[in-house]
Image: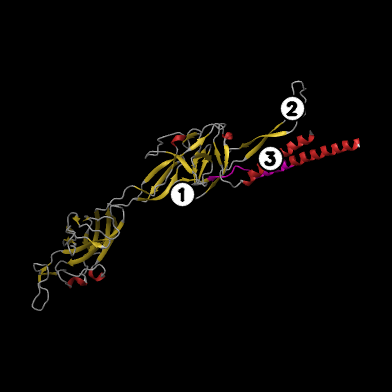
Amino acid sequence: MTFFTSLSGLKGAQSDLGVISNNIANVASIGFKKSRAEFGDLISASPLQSGNVAGQGTRMKSISQQFTQGGFQTSDRALDLAISGQGFFVTKSDGQMSFTRNGALSVDENRYLVNSNGAYVQVLPVDTTGSVTATGISSAQNLQVPLSAGRPRATTTLELSATFPSDADLPAGRSTYAGSIPYAFDRYDTQSYNYSSATTVYDASGNPQQATIYYVRTTAPGSTVRTPILDANGDPVLDANGDPTYTTTTATNSQWEAHLFVGDRKASADGQADTDPATPMVLTFATDGSLVSPTGAQQFSGVLPSGASEPITLSLSYGNATRQAASTFTPGSFSQDGKAAGQLNNISVGSNGLVTATFSDGTTQKLGKIMIANFANPNGLRQLGDSRWGSTGLSGEAIVSEAGSGSAGLIQSGALEQANVDITEELVALISAQRNFSANAKAIETGNTMTQTIINLRS
């Protein structure tokens, strides 16, 4: 009987060594919970025996999980999460629910929030204010991160202002004539215009286009204005030498032309899409530098630049801040009413588990609240590996709630929970288990010696 008693001790010590070794091996596993081997003694007694009965060994009753809080390791990732307090993250893979303290989350190729095992992280649905709209394990859903938010809006209005220099020269191309074109403006020829300014506008699909305005000074106060005489076809009337003929007047104010290009297409200020060449917008300034005209918005013709999904029709207006003065050309405010769909910029997770996406247009969207599950008896959970557990009849059903409510702990973003293994404690336990193993082996050796002695006496 001594052999079998000590053998049970050897097996128990070996099992204890295995549990301790597993704890030590997983000291770096995120969300790992250490185990403890629990043993009980074996007693065989009948109703007629006295109370003083020798034990007959040991047996392993269970391997108990220790769900104590592990230390936190901070990180720079917003999707590294740790639960400060009780509870488990809820994940789903292949239709099976599992529970974990491993909060190393990421977004997969389909933009779903998953953990390091590729399982979908479960969240509670929320409304636009972030309030939960459904509770319970049956309301769990996967969280998909959107790439964009809102609808794009085509630009229809440009509002701007600028200061024009009163001493600006007329471009060199002002005296050049070709066909019915009063003078040779060419946006690729910097000698044919004075200044330019640009901004970004959008088509109906949110595709960006650059809107550029080229400014050409055409008259100055006191200057002689030569206006070509045109025939019925709009062509210059030529003199006997074949040169264009003009009428001359003396300018009393200052005028600038604004040529609007959207992408690679020029818009016409007369609002007619078929005008060729496109008509520029004319800005007239009084002798005191104030803007005389236009007094309101100027509607340009719609144009379809390369890369645009639909034509872009703009209304251009200059504010009261636009004037002519003895200074350099200074573009002022430049605003437009279009926008592209907001692109995803950031994902954040609050202490209550609320996942919020922030987009490039400044808008935010509440995506859901991280689901936290608790159990009446966590020690009854079934280990699934990779720091995951499954519910059983011993653990009871999952009690689902929001982080920070009831018995659920708070969520800390930018941190991961380390294994709750104390390496010093485990090494001491390892030495103790080794001593137990050696002691039981020694007991077997002693029993063997006694048996051999008895055999030798008989011989």
Q: Earlier in the sequence, mark 3 or mark 2?
A: 3
Residue position marked by numbered label 3 in the rendering: 15
Which residue: 86% across, 38% down?
A: 452
Magenta span: 416-434
Q: Please tell me whether mark 1 sits on a helix, a strand or a loop.
A: loop
The first of marks 3 and 1 along the sequence is 3
Q: Amino acid at mark 2?
A: Ser
Quadrant of the image containing the N terminus: top right
Amino acid type at circle 1 is Asp
Q: What's the CA distance linking mark 2 and mark 1? A: 58 Å
Decide if residue 407 is on the left or right side of residue 6.
left
Marks 3/1: CA distance?
Answer: 40 Å
Q: Can residue 208 be seen in the rendering of this structure?
A: yes
The answer to which image quadrant residue 66 occupies is top right
**Amino acid type, callout 3:** Ser
Identify the residue position indicated by label 2 in the image.
44
Q: Residue at x 46, y 45 (%)?
A: 113
Element carrying mark 3:
helix
What is the C-alpha distance between the residues marked 3 and 2? 23 Å
Q: Which is closer to the viewer, label 3 or label 2?
A: 2
Residue holding disc 1:
108
Q: Position of residue 384 (x, y in %)?
A: 57, 41
In the rendered view, would you say 407 is above or below 164?
A: above
Quadrant placement of the C terminus: top right
- The nearer-to-camera label among 2 and 1 is 2
Report the side of 240 relative to 401 (left or right).
Answer: left
